[in-house]
Image (cartoon, rainbow, N blue to C red):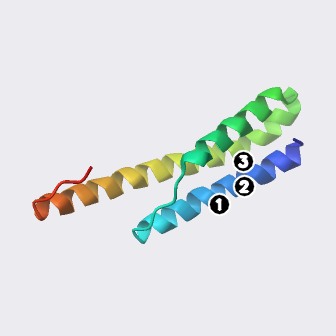
Amino acid sequence: MTKDELIAEIEALRGIVAMGQDKLKENQYLDMELLQAKVDEACQVVADFLPEDAGEIREPLSALLDDLQSYSNFVGEHQEKLKVTAEDSNTTVD
């Protein structure tokens, strides 16, 4: 995979993360399991690049990691809201 292809892949992953967060706002869910494999693959590709090429990937990859952290925080907040709602209605959420 070339540097430009990897950057495009990272941008596509960022789009998936954003879509997942948008869907969650609407109480819809995306299966994000495949995303982990794609992120792992991108990191492995970067590890195989020459240092000067890998340096150019740092900013897009860092942005993806920021997006993933934001998504994780959002999921946690969403789960907490579901838990509170369930407690208010005397039911449990798994």
Q: Nearer the viewer, residue 31 or 16?
A: 31
**Quadrant of residue 43 in the image?**
top right
Whole-number angstrom distance, CA of label 1 to CA of label 2: 6 Å
Q: Which mark is residue 60?
A: 3
Is 48 situated above or below 17?
above
Amino acid type indicated by mark 3: Pro
Q: Position of residue 57 (x, y in %)?
A: 78, 41
Residue topped by disc 1 = 15
Q: Are marks 1 and 2 in contact (CB under 8 Å)?
A: yes
Residue topped by disc 2 = 11
Element type where label 3 sits in the image: helix
Whole-number angstrom distance, CA of label 3 to CA of label 2: 7 Å
**Quadrant of residue 42 in the image?**
top right
Is 72 situated above or below 86?
above
Callout 3: few (<14), some (14-19), or many (20+) C-alpha neighbours within 10 Å?
A: some
Residue at 42 percent across and 72 percent down: it is 26
Amino acid type indicated by mark 2: Glu
Numbered circles on residues, count: 3
Is 77 situated above or below 23?
above
Whole-number angstrom distance, CA of label 1 to CA of label 3: 12 Å
In this rendering, position of residue 25 left or right of residue 61: left
> Which numbered disc, 3 or 2, marks the residue closer to the eye?
2
Callout 1: few (<14), some (14-19), or many (20+) C-alpha neighbours within 10 Å?
A: some
Q: Nearer the viewer, residue 66 or 68?
A: 68
Q: Are marks 3 and 2 in contact (CB under 8 Å)?
A: yes
> Which numbered disc, 1 or 3, marks the residue closer to the eye?
1
Amino acid type indicated by mark 1: Gly
